[in-house]
Image: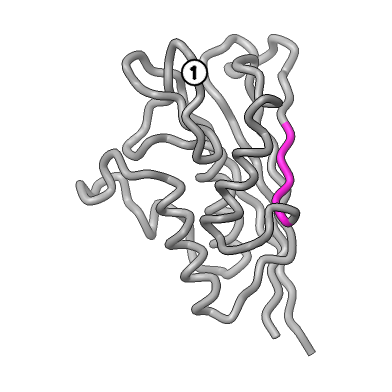
Amino acid sequence: MSEMRIGLGYDVHAFAEGRALVLGGVEIEHPVGLAGHSDADVLVHALMDAILGAMRAGDIGAHFPDTDAAWAGASSIGLLARVGDLMRAGGWNLVDADTVLVLESPRISPHRDTMRIRMAEALGVDAARIGLKATTTEGLGATGRGEGVAAQAVVLLERS
């Protein structure tokens, strides 16, 4: 009999001048990027936390602390690949992941497929296992005011 677990991840980063905007492993043309110790890829961070949570293996702060200079400026997609290695080493397989970006701009639809492919490649799974949507908050809250980007992810893992 197999064991199945779900995991939920959430992250938010403020916009910052002088940084590239990286979402889902894709650099997107935008006047500002996101503040963070790594490349601040909020979408990948939420996905990593969801996977780690389903495995009961802590969170990204425990694995890649922002107090460790080794992770300064790190590629989040590279960190996702490390989480994928941990997942497989623990005997887990990604059954499905669904993610959502919450932001007013930029538009995500032109980048959606590339983002799904990049995240799937990092995890060693077919892109059909990674869902991605984007939504606005209709001008409400910090994301609605254009102060930053939030992301949520939910995953289903299976261990046989």
Q: Position of residue 13 (x, y in %)?
A: 47, 29
Q: Residue at x 73, y 56 (%)?
A: 129
Residue situated in front as seen by the camera: 113 or 67: 113
Q: Position of residue 109 (x, y in %)?
A: 71, 26
Q: Residue at x 42, y 35 (%)?
A: 40
Snapshot quadrant of residue 101: top right
Q: Residue at x 59, y 60 (%)?
A: 51
Residue at mark 1: 29
Height in image: 69 above or below 88? Answer: above
Residue 22 magenta = no
Height in image: 56 above or below 102? Answer: below
**Magenta-tinted stretch:** 129-133
Q: Position of residue 100 (x, y in %)?
A: 69, 37
Height in image: 159 above or below 87? Answer: below
Residue situated in front as seen by the camera: 16 or 56: 16
Q: Position of residue 12 (x, y in %)?
A: 53, 32
Height in image: 119 above or below 37? Answer: below
**Which amino acid lies under the numbered mark 1 shown in the image of this protein?**
Glu
Task: Classify residue 1 as left or right of residue 11.
Answer: right
